[in-house]
Structure formats: C-alpha cells, structure tokens
Image (tube, rainbow, N blue to C red):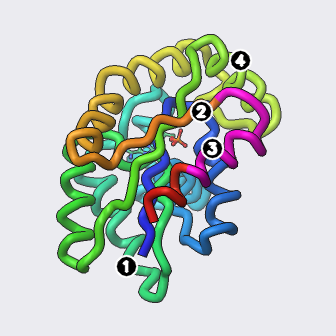
C-alpha cells in the first residue's frame, strides 16, 4: 500500500502532478478541493457550507473536512493506495489521517512538498483563473489570503511529517515532466 501526501501552496502543481502519479502508481486520487467543488456544483448541503469558506480563501473546518475525507477513503476498498492532494492542511487533519489509516493497518508513506516561490505562484494562479475559471483564483485578495492561510495554518504540517522522517522537499519549478521525474525518484526511494 502506497499512501502519498502531495503538499504545497495553492498553485504549486499538486493537481497536475497527482494526475500523472495516479496513473503511474495505480493509486486513487483524493483532492479535497475537487470534492468540495463537486459538492458546490451539485448544490449539496456540504457544498454550500464549504463555499462560504472557499469564497474567502479560508479553510473549511477540520471536523467537516476530516469526515468527508474518511468517507471517500472508505468508498475505495480495493485501492492499492491513495494520493491525498490538498489534505491534510492542518495538524489536526494530519493526526486524524494517521489515526484513521492506523486503524486500517495503513500509514502515510511520504509527504512530497512542492516548493515554488510566491511570485511564480501568483502568476500561475492568475493563468489558472483564465483557463479553469475557479472563482477563488480570480480575486487577488482571495489569492493573497489563501497564501497567508497556507503559511500560517498549513505549512506547520510539514514539520509534523519531518519529525516522523516522512518528508521530501521537491523543487516545483521547471517543466511538468521534470518535476514529475523528481517526484517519482523520491517516491521510488521510499517504496
Ligand atoms: P484546493 O483546490 O486544494 O486549492 O482547495 C480549494 C479550497 O478548498 C481551499 O482554499 C479551502 O477553502 C478548501 N479546502 C480544500 N482542502 C481543504 C482541507 N484539507 N481543509 C480545509 N479546507 C480545504
């Protein structure tokens, strides 16, 4: 079982790389952002709750996010493993994920942290706003808040995995293929 945590600020390339890694390692891709967006599109109760946070660039509360993630994992009994994309984003989520996986005899294999500087992130998010039409990419204030929330609430999650010897920093600048090769090299060393 391989369980990868793909980590990095908004615009780091997590979604793009997750799609490639899923194919290569035959894993199930779970993106909490995508699941929230799916719920917003389908006008579910969860969607309307998530939207009120996402529109401002804030995190959806831990309780809601953890419950949703766990129920998604439980839908895939025969999975060879998972790529968690955009989760965990707080230390509470990281601990919940560890406990939840441990109860099933599983664990996080490694956290892969894509490193991209702020200037590059802002320019990538602006481009993504044009191509994907995400509301939270179109507003500079929301972008700035998401980067601030990442620094304050999410970046400490890296220390959590560092302390467990499960952290790999990956240079997220360059061609998509080159970044994919860096990720695979780090994963292959760990499995
Ligand atoms: P993303 O697609 O990963 O950039 O996520 C978009 C938005 O969804 C974030 O700005 C948060 O509002 C929300 N979100 C996604 N994942 C999480 C999470 N693990 N915890 C809390 N909020 C999340």
Q: Residues within 10 Å of mark 1 (few under 14, many from 20)?
A: few
The image quadrant where one finds the N terminus is bottom left
Measured as percent of width and height from the top left, residue 149 is found at 37, 24
Horizontal side of residue 112 vs 117, given as left or right: left
**Which mark lies nearer to you, 2 or 4?**
2
The mark nearer the N terminus, 1 or 3, is 1
Between the C-alphas of marks 1 and 3, the distance is: 30 Å
Give the SS element for disc 2.
Answer: loop
Instruction: Identify which residue is drawn at 59% across, 30% down.
Output: 171
Which residue carries the number 1 mark?
74
Between the C-alphas of marks 4 and 3, the distance is: 23 Å
Which residue carries the number 4 mark?
123
Between the C-alphas of marks 2 and 4, the distance is: 11 Å
Instruction: Identify which residue is drawn at 50% across, 61% down.
Output: 83
Between the C-alphas of marks 2 and 1, the distance is: 28 Å
Give the SS element for disc 1.
Answer: helix
The mark nearer the N terminus, 2 or 1, is 2
- Point out the stretch of residues depicted in magenta: 173-185
Image quadrant of ligand 1 equals top left
Q: Residues within 10 Å of mark 3 (few under 14, many from 20)?
A: some
Between the C-alphas of marks 3 and 2, the distance is: 14 Å
The mark nearer the N terminus, 3 or 2, is 2
Between the C-alphas of marks 1 and 4, the distance is: 37 Å
Instruction: Report the front residue among 145 and 81.
Output: 81
Which residue carries the number 2 mark?
12
Instruction: Report the front residue among 146 and 46.
Output: 146
């Amino acid at each position: 079982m391989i369980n990868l945590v793909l980590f990095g600020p908004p615009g780091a390339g997590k979604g793009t790389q997750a799609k490639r890694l899923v194919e290569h390692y035959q894993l199930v891709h779970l993106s909490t952002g995508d699941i929230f967006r799916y719920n917003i599109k389908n006008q579910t109760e969860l969607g309307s709750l998530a939207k009120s946070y996402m529109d401002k660039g804030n995190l959806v509360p831990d309780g809601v996010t953890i419950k949703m993630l766990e129920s998604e994992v439980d839908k895939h009994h025969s999975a060879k493993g998972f790529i968690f994309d955009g989760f965990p984003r707080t230390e509470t989520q990281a601990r919940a994920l560890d406990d939840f996986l441990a109860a099933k005899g599983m664990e996080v294999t490694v956290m892969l942290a894509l490193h991209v500087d702020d200037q590059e992130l802002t320019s990538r998010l602006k481009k993504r706003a044009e191509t994907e039409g995400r509301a939270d990419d179109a507003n500079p204030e929301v972008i700035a808040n998401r980067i601030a929330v990442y620094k304050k609430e999410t970046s400490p999650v890296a220390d959590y995995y560092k302390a467990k010897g499960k952290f790999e920093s990956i240079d997220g600048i360059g061609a998509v293929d080159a970044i994919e090769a860096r990720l695979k090299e780090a994963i292959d060393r760990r499995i």
